[in-house]
Image (tube, rainbow, N blue to C red):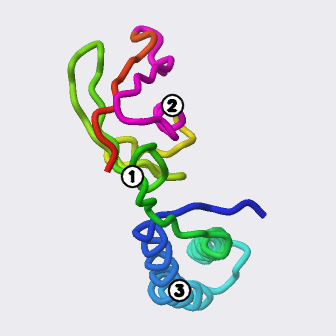
Amino acid sequence: MKTVYLTKKQFQSLEEEIKEIEEVKIPSNTKALERAKEFGDLSENAEYQAAKETHEKLFQKLNELNNKLNRAEIIQRKTDKTRADIGHRIELTSLDTGDVFSFELIAESGDGIDTIDTETKLGSSVLHKSKDDVISFESNDSNLGTLRYKINKIS
């Protein structure tokens, strides 16, 4: 099974989501199933069918989250900040616009704003690069063409 690299914050968020499903959503759904059963014929009972579908989705999601958590390895931020790596905060300047922005480089599930994952064009371009390196990659927007950035800071 493939290892899932997560920040401590991502790991904790998964644990919280699992707890929410187990302690709130499943018990609530179980009550809804019981109430719906009281309406009679289950084959024509829309409330029961909806609650049953929700029940299946909750357990599927719970299984996916537990599977991910079981394969997770918490990323330890490397003290060597000469090369960009998972867990580092990266500051870039656009060589085209002069705009400066920063983000945390993570292994997966980045939000595309404050966290960028290594599976994206930007994330894979920055990974293992050094301060003052220039990176470039093709934009997802064909009108923008090739994007170029200079790495200002790795922290």
Which of 21 and 74 lies nearest the eye of the viewer? 74
Could you tell me the amino acid type at mark 1? His
Measured as percent of width and height from the top left, residue 75 is found at 51, 64
Which of 135 and 131 lies nearest the eye of the viewer? 131
Magenta span contains residue 124: yes
Measured as percent of width and height from the top left, residue 56 is found at 66, 73
Could you tell me the amino acid type at mark 2? Ser
| Circle 2 residues within 10 Å: few <14, some 14–19, many ≥20 | some
**On the image, numbered disc 3 is attached to which residue?**
22
136 relative position to 30: left or right? left
Q: Secondary structure at mark 2?
A: helix
| Circle 3 residues within 10 Å: few <14, some 14–19, many ≥20 | some
116 relative position to 62: left or right? left
Task: Give the extent of the magenta segment.
Answer: 122-143
109 relative position to 97: left or right? right
**On the image, numbered disc 2 is attached to which residue?**
125
**Residue reaching furthest to the right:** 1
State which tag comes first along the sequence, 2 or 1. Answer: 1
